[in-house]
Amino acid sequence: RVDAFFDALTQRAKAFGQVNRDALLLGDDTAAAYAVVSAVEKRIDDFFERCRVVAYMGSDDEHERKPHTSADGVSADELRALPMARPTPSGVLPLHTGINPVDRDNVDRLAKQVLAPLELRHDVLGETEWRHVKRLFAPYAAFHAALAANPTSSLPLSRVHELLQSDARAHFAALLERDAAAKPRVAALHNVERLVHAWCHLSDLMRNFVSFEQFADKHTSCFQVGHVVLDGRRADLVLPVESEERILDHAELATRGNCFLVYLRCTKKEQSRVVVAVFTSGYSDHLYAGRRGVFYANDGGEFDALVVHVVEHPLGLREAATRPFQQGVRLLERVMLPRVGSALTANLSEATKKLDVGVLAAFFVGFGAVSTAVATFVHGFLQLGLLMPLGVLGIASAVSGPSMLVALLKSRRRHLGPILEASGWAINVSPRITLRLGEQLTTQLPGVLVRPHRRRYIVAACLLTAAASAAGLGWQLSDDASDLRRLVRSKLLY
């Protein structure tokens, strides 16, 4: 490396020695002067072109349409869109007054480092003088383009000669030899550093990612980034997601953990992040995209959270017991009732215009069949007598049993492995989320009612069951009493 660097210095020095003296018109200051000319070349060319337009048309329409506001009301981008100075038919660029603020520094350097050393006027600049300046720097421009690939092109020429005339090559070579001799010691220091880190943090690493002892005991570990408050509950198991565009990819792998996942976009002023909250208990009726909550990061930040995606899985046996009935009600509300209403609305006018006796007869036949089936079911149910509560339980078990069985199997298979792997962690042992642990990871906030409408439904169902049992018992007793009266009457007659 030292040899390559000094070879580049030698090549550059030879190139400067062979270059025509006309190219170095300012000596060692030529490079700095050429940099100033290159910085203002496009802006000055644009100014003189506008001046020619003004001389031809009488005004610069684009410039005249620009609003003349104070400096505080104009941004830097708007100033760059304006010319370097106000174009005039005379085509003269003033160098001290009327200059665009974004070009002020470059114009001052042009006057001091280029025009003054060339013994040109440095108060105004005409188009003829500007073309003369560009012709003077044309040889150096060609030379600069030829040496642009040289790695030492940023060094001043005086520094290049200074390095070549000194013993810098031997000094740099000695430093590299010292670095090479110290390489084994540095590698040993790296090993010592790794040993120190292992001594200090290996226990925490093992307790977090091998045995998951810290997560199971305190429900806090290094892969958790905070907690989410949503729907009156606090979810402590929150993990990061790379970006909002990666949510579907994350969910495709994380859904194998059989956990209810809620993906949230968290914003705070100009900060934004995406997290996934794992809900492990409660009900999922009000966990859907569009809901808002609050995300509390471990570093103390508080973010507004918006639900953007949900991966549904059973949360528990209580929800699984009522889910079939809820789905039936939703199906009735969303599918059946709208269809029936539209059909009645479409056929009502035709039915009022023309009444078909056959259709009416078919309607009553169907109504009678349904009524007979309902009456048969009610009569058979009332015949159970004291066993009617067991009949209600049997019907509920037949409806909710499969859902509860699926929820139980999935709850026993809930684990963190796929969720952690989707978030970028490499896991060898996947910890299970038991029902007891799930109740601790997702807790109800104090002072929040736990679905009071569900309690009303349960109480109403119990009351209806008790009323139906009482009615059935009364029906059975009345039948027994009538049979007893008929038996006594027959005995008395015969």
Image (tube, rainbow, N blue to C red):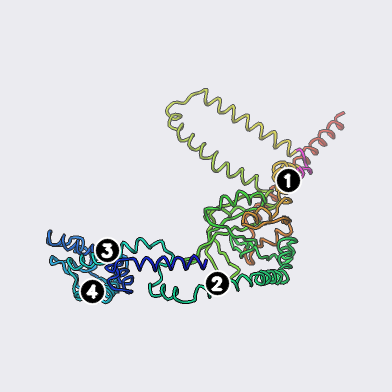
The residue that appears at 58% across and 42% down in the rendered structure is 331
User: Which amino acid lies under the numbered mark 4 shown in the image of this protein?
Assistant: Leu
Q: Position of residue 187 (x, y in %)?
A: 66, 69
The residue that appears at 73% across and 64% down in the rendered structure is 206
Do the numbered discs 3 and 4 sit on residues whose CB atoms are within 8 Å?
no
Instruction: State the residue in front, 246 or 385.
Output: 246
Label drawn at residue 173: 2
Mark-to-mark CA distance, 1 and 3: 87 Å
Dot 2: element: helix
Q: Position of residue 157 (x, y in %)?
A: 38, 72
User: Which amino acid lies under the numbered mark 2 shown in the image of this protein?
Assistant: Ala
Q: Earlier in the sequence, mark 3 or mark 2?
A: 3
Q: Which residue is mark 4?
A: 118
Q: Earlier in the sequence, mark 4 or mark 1?
A: 4
Q: Residue furthest top?
A: 358
**How dense is the environment of label 1, judged by Cα within 10 Å: few (below 14), some, or many (20 and up)?**
some
Residue 313 visible, this angle = yes
Residue stretch in magenta? 383-390
Q: Which residue is mark 3?
A: 138
The part of the image, by quadrant, that contains residue 19 is bottom left
Q: Earlier in the sequence, mark 1 or mark 2?
A: 2
Seen in the picture, residue 339 relative to 411 is either above or below; the reply is above
**How dense is the environment of label 3, judged by Cα within 10 Å: few (below 14), some, or many (20 and up)?**
some
Q: Earlier in the sequence, mark 2 or mark 4?
A: 4
Q: Which residue is mark 1?
A: 405
Do the numbered discs 1 and 2 sit on residues whose CB atoms are within 8 Å?
no
Q: Earlier in the sequence, mark 1 or mark 3?
A: 3
Q: Position of residue 268 (x, y in %)?
A: 50, 66
Dot 1: element: helix
Q: Earlier in the sequence, mark 3 or mark 4?
A: 4
